[in-house]
Image (cartoon, grey):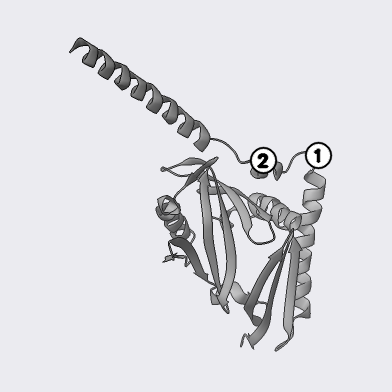
Amino acid sequence: MKKFLGCFLSVLLFLVLLFSVLGLWFWHAAKQVPDFYKELEVSQESRQDAEKDSQAMEQKVQRLRHTMKLGRIWLLEFSQDELNHWLAIAIGEKRPGMIPHQLKNPRCVILSDRIQAGVTVDAPEYKGVVSLECVPKIPEPNVVDLELLSVSAGSLKMPGKLFRKIIKRGADSASLPVEVLDRDGKMVLRMPLRKGDLAFEKHIIQVNTLTFQDGKIMITGTIVDEVKD
Protein backbone atom coordinates (compact mmCIF):
# COMPACT_ATOMS: atom_id res chain seq x y z
CA MET A 1 0.00 0.00 0.00
CA LYS A 2 2.81 2.41 0.87
CA LYS A 3 4.48 1.65 -2.46
CA PHE A 4 1.20 2.32 -4.26
CA LEU A 5 0.69 5.64 -2.43
CA GLY A 6 4.29 6.59 -3.08
CA CYS A 7 3.94 5.77 -6.78
CA PHE A 8 0.59 7.57 -6.96
CA LEU A 9 2.05 10.65 -5.23
CA SER A 10 5.05 10.62 -7.58
CA VAL A 11 2.76 10.47 -10.63
CA LEU A 12 0.54 13.23 -9.19
CA LEU A 13 3.52 15.51 -8.54
CA PHE A 14 4.82 14.79 -12.04
CA LEU A 15 1.46 15.75 -13.57
CA VAL A 16 1.31 18.95 -11.49
CA LEU A 17 4.83 19.84 -12.63
CA LEU A 18 3.98 18.97 -16.25
CA PHE A 19 0.81 21.07 -16.32
CA SER A 20 2.61 23.94 -14.58
CA VAL A 21 5.31 23.89 -17.24
CA LEU A 22 2.70 23.63 -20.01
CA GLY A 23 0.73 26.51 -18.48
CA LEU A 24 3.82 28.71 -18.37
CA TRP A 25 4.65 27.71 -21.95
CA PHE A 26 1.13 28.57 -23.20
CA TRP A 27 1.21 31.92 -21.38
CA HIS A 28 4.64 32.75 -22.76
CA ALA A 29 3.72 31.65 -26.28
CA ALA A 30 0.53 33.74 -26.25
CA LYS A 31 2.57 36.83 -25.36
CA GLN A 32 5.13 36.33 -28.12
CA VAL A 33 5.24 38.78 -31.03
CA PRO A 34 5.55 37.08 -34.46
CA ASP A 35 8.78 37.81 -36.32
CA PHE A 36 7.01 39.12 -39.44
CA TYR A 37 5.07 41.60 -37.28
CA LYS A 38 8.22 42.95 -35.63
CA GLU A 39 10.00 43.28 -38.97
CA LEU A 40 7.23 45.52 -40.35
CA GLU A 41 7.41 48.03 -37.50
CA VAL A 42 8.12 51.60 -38.57
CA SER A 43 11.40 52.67 -36.94
CA GLN A 44 13.09 56.04 -36.79
CA GLU A 45 15.44 54.86 -39.54
CA SER A 46 12.59 53.80 -41.85
CA ARG A 47 10.27 56.70 -40.99
CA GLN A 48 11.11 58.81 -44.05
CA ASP A 49 10.60 55.92 -46.49
CA ALA A 50 7.37 54.99 -44.70
CA GLU A 51 5.97 58.51 -45.15
CA LYS A 52 6.87 58.42 -48.86
CA ASP A 53 5.12 55.05 -49.30
CA SER A 54 2.04 56.32 -47.46
CA GLN A 55 1.88 59.39 -49.68
CA ALA A 56 2.37 57.22 -52.80
CA MET A 57 -0.60 55.09 -51.77
CA GLU A 58 -2.86 58.11 -51.32
CA GLN A 59 -1.66 59.63 -54.61
CA LYS A 60 -2.59 56.44 -56.47
CA VAL A 61 -6.11 56.64 -55.07
CA GLN A 62 -6.37 60.34 -55.98
CA ARG A 63 -5.19 59.67 -59.56
CA LEU A 64 -7.73 56.88 -59.85
CA ARG A 65 -10.50 59.27 -58.85
CA HIS A 66 -9.59 61.68 -61.65
CA THR A 67 -9.21 59.04 -64.38
CA MET A 68 -12.32 56.95 -63.75
CA LYS A 69 -14.90 56.96 -66.51
CA LEU A 70 -18.34 55.40 -66.66
CA GLY A 71 -18.23 51.84 -68.03
CA ARG A 72 -14.42 51.58 -68.15
CA ILE A 73 -12.43 49.08 -66.12
CA TRP A 74 -10.13 50.64 -63.54
CA LEU A 75 -7.07 49.10 -61.84
CA LEU A 76 -5.53 49.93 -58.47
CA GLU A 77 -2.18 48.28 -57.73
CA PHE A 78 -0.12 48.78 -54.60
CA SER A 79 2.82 47.12 -52.89
CA GLN A 80 3.15 45.56 -49.47
CA ASP A 81 5.29 48.46 -48.25
CA GLU A 82 2.80 51.04 -49.51
CA LEU A 83 -0.07 49.27 -47.79
CA ASN A 84 1.72 48.78 -44.46
CA HIS A 85 3.07 52.30 -44.31
CA TRP A 86 -0.31 53.75 -45.29
CA LEU A 87 -1.89 51.74 -42.46
CA ALA A 88 0.78 52.90 -40.01
CA ILE A 89 0.79 56.60 -40.88
CA ALA A 90 -2.34 57.63 -42.80
CA ILE A 91 -4.62 55.43 -40.70
CA GLY A 92 -2.74 54.69 -37.47
CA GLU A 93 -1.54 58.24 -36.85
CA LYS A 94 -3.77 60.59 -38.84
CA ARG A 95 -7.13 58.77 -38.86
CA PRO A 96 -7.05 56.20 -36.03
CA GLY A 97 -10.85 56.22 -35.74
CA MET A 98 -11.14 54.30 -39.02
CA ILE A 99 -10.44 50.98 -37.29
CA PRO A 100 -12.01 49.59 -34.07
CA HIS A 101 -10.35 51.01 -30.95
CA GLN A 102 -9.57 47.49 -29.66
CA LEU A 103 -7.26 46.96 -32.65
CA LYS A 104 -3.96 48.76 -33.23
CA ASN A 105 -1.01 48.64 -35.61
CA PRO A 106 -2.37 46.39 -38.39
CA ARG A 107 0.34 44.97 -40.67
CA CYS A 108 0.42 42.38 -43.42
CA VAL A 109 2.65 40.30 -45.65
CA ILE A 110 1.46 39.58 -49.20
CA LEU A 111 2.46 36.07 -50.25
CA SER A 112 1.89 34.20 -53.51
CA ASP A 113 -1.20 32.29 -52.34
CA ARG A 114 -2.37 34.05 -49.17
CA ILE A 115 -1.99 37.05 -46.94
CA GLN A 116 -0.44 36.98 -43.49
CA ALA A 117 -1.71 39.76 -41.25
CA GLY A 118 -1.25 40.80 -37.64
CA VAL A 119 -2.78 43.32 -35.27
CA THR A 120 -2.33 44.27 -31.63
CA VAL A 121 -5.50 43.44 -29.69
CA ASP A 122 -6.57 45.17 -26.49
CA ALA A 123 -9.73 43.32 -25.44
CA PRO A 124 -10.99 41.74 -22.20
CA GLU A 125 -10.48 38.24 -23.62
CA TYR A 126 -6.94 38.83 -24.83
CA LYS A 127 -4.21 41.46 -24.88
CA GLY A 128 -1.40 40.85 -27.33
CA VAL A 129 -0.71 40.29 -31.02
CA VAL A 130 -3.18 38.21 -33.02
CA SER A 131 -2.01 37.09 -36.44
CA LEU A 132 -3.78 35.19 -39.15
CA GLU A 133 -3.30 33.69 -42.57
CA CYS A 134 -6.17 34.19 -44.96
CA VAL A 135 -7.18 34.03 -48.59
CA PRO A 136 -9.15 37.14 -49.64
CA LYS A 137 -11.67 36.66 -52.44
CA ILE A 138 -14.43 38.59 -54.14
CA PRO A 139 -17.15 35.94 -54.74
CA GLU A 140 -19.46 38.53 -56.26
CA PRO A 141 -19.12 42.25 -57.03
CA ASN A 142 -18.70 44.42 -53.93
CA VAL A 143 -18.53 41.46 -51.53
CA VAL A 144 -15.25 40.52 -49.83
CA ASP A 145 -14.68 37.08 -48.28
CA LEU A 146 -11.70 36.37 -46.02
CA GLU A 147 -11.17 32.63 -45.63
CA LEU A 148 -9.17 32.11 -42.43
CA LEU A 149 -6.47 29.43 -42.79
CA SER A 150 -5.06 29.91 -39.29
CA VAL A 151 -5.29 32.23 -36.30
CA SER A 152 -2.52 32.67 -33.72
CA ALA A 153 -2.33 34.41 -30.38
CA GLY A 154 1.34 35.31 -30.16
CA SER A 155 3.12 32.22 -31.46
CA LEU A 156 0.35 29.90 -30.30
CA LYS A 157 -2.09 28.69 -32.97
CA MET A 158 -5.67 28.94 -31.76
CA PRO A 159 -9.05 27.82 -33.13
CA GLY A 160 -10.54 30.72 -35.05
CA LYS A 161 -13.88 30.30 -33.28
CA LEU A 162 -12.30 31.59 -30.04
CA PHE A 163 -11.99 35.00 -31.70
CA ARG A 164 -15.49 35.00 -33.16
CA LYS A 165 -16.88 37.24 -30.40
CA ILE A 166 -13.93 39.65 -30.55
CA ILE A 167 -14.26 39.95 -34.34
CA LYS A 168 -18.01 40.45 -34.18
CA ARG A 169 -17.85 42.98 -31.36
CA GLY A 170 -15.06 44.93 -33.05
CA ALA A 171 -17.02 44.99 -36.31
CA ASP A 172 -20.18 46.13 -34.54
CA SER A 173 -18.36 48.92 -32.69
CA ALA A 174 -17.03 50.20 -36.03
CA SER A 175 -20.42 49.70 -37.73
CA LEU A 176 -18.87 47.26 -40.20
CA PRO A 177 -21.31 44.77 -41.79
CA VAL A 178 -19.15 41.70 -41.11
CA GLU A 179 -20.81 38.28 -41.21
CA VAL A 180 -18.97 35.30 -39.69
CA LEU A 181 -19.60 32.11 -41.70
CA ASP A 182 -18.56 28.47 -41.39
CA ARG A 183 -17.46 26.89 -44.65
CA ASP A 184 -16.12 23.31 -44.70
CA GLY A 185 -14.85 23.68 -41.15
CA LYS A 186 -13.14 27.02 -41.83
CA MET A 187 -14.24 30.42 -40.64
CA VAL A 188 -15.00 32.94 -43.36
CA LEU A 189 -15.51 36.65 -42.74
CA ARG A 190 -17.90 38.12 -45.31
CA MET A 191 -18.12 41.89 -45.68
CA PRO A 192 -20.42 43.48 -48.26
CA LEU A 193 -19.07 46.86 -49.32
CA ARG A 194 -21.55 49.59 -48.47
CA LYS A 195 -22.71 52.10 -51.06
CA GLY A 196 -21.20 54.92 -49.00
CA ASP A 197 -17.81 53.17 -49.13
CA LEU A 198 -18.05 52.95 -52.92
CA ALA A 199 -18.74 56.62 -53.65
CA PHE A 200 -15.88 58.44 -55.37
CA GLU A 201 -16.80 62.09 -55.86
CA LYS A 202 -19.81 61.88 -58.24
CA HIS A 203 -19.42 58.20 -59.07
CA ILE A 204 -20.41 54.83 -57.60
CA ILE A 205 -17.81 52.15 -58.23
CA GLN A 206 -18.08 48.39 -58.42
CA VAL A 207 -15.21 46.18 -57.22
CA ASN A 208 -14.95 43.05 -59.37
CA THR A 209 -11.64 41.26 -58.73
CA LEU A 210 -8.85 41.06 -56.19
CA THR A 211 -5.61 39.27 -57.02
CA PHE A 212 -2.26 39.20 -55.29
CA GLN A 213 1.24 37.94 -55.79
CA ASP A 214 4.48 38.28 -53.85
CA GLY A 215 4.49 41.81 -52.50
CA LYS A 216 1.61 43.28 -54.55
CA ILE A 217 -2.19 43.50 -54.59
CA MET A 218 -4.29 44.33 -57.67
CA ILE A 219 -7.93 45.42 -57.49
CA THR A 220 -10.13 45.99 -60.53
CA GLY A 221 -13.63 47.29 -61.03
CA THR A 222 -15.87 49.61 -63.01
CA ILE A 223 -18.00 52.70 -62.53
CA VAL A 224 -21.62 51.58 -62.59
CA ASP A 225 -23.50 54.78 -61.83
CA GLU A 226 -23.22 58.49 -61.27
CA VAL A 227 -24.50 60.15 -58.12
CA LYS A 228 -27.44 62.40 -58.93
CA ASP A 229 -27.53 65.86 -57.39
Kindly identify the amino acid type of the residue bearing the numbered disc 1. Glu
Residue nearest the viewer, comparing 209 with 226: 209
Quarter assignment of residue 65: bottom right
Residue drawn at 38 percent across, 28 percent down: 19
Residue 148 percent location from the top left of the image: 52, 59
Identify the residue position indicated by label 2 in the image: 38
Residue 198 percent location from the top left of the image: 61, 75
Q: Secondary structure at mark 1?
A: loop
- Against 30, residue 148 (above or below) is below
- Against 183, residue 54 (above or below) is above
Residue 118 percent location from the top left of the image: 59, 49
Identify the residue position indicated by label 1 in the image: 45
Where, quadrant-wise, is the C terminus in this rendering?
bottom right
Residue drawn at 46 percent across, 61 percent down: 186
Residue 49 percent location from the top left of the image: 82, 49
Quarter assignment of residue 134: bottom right
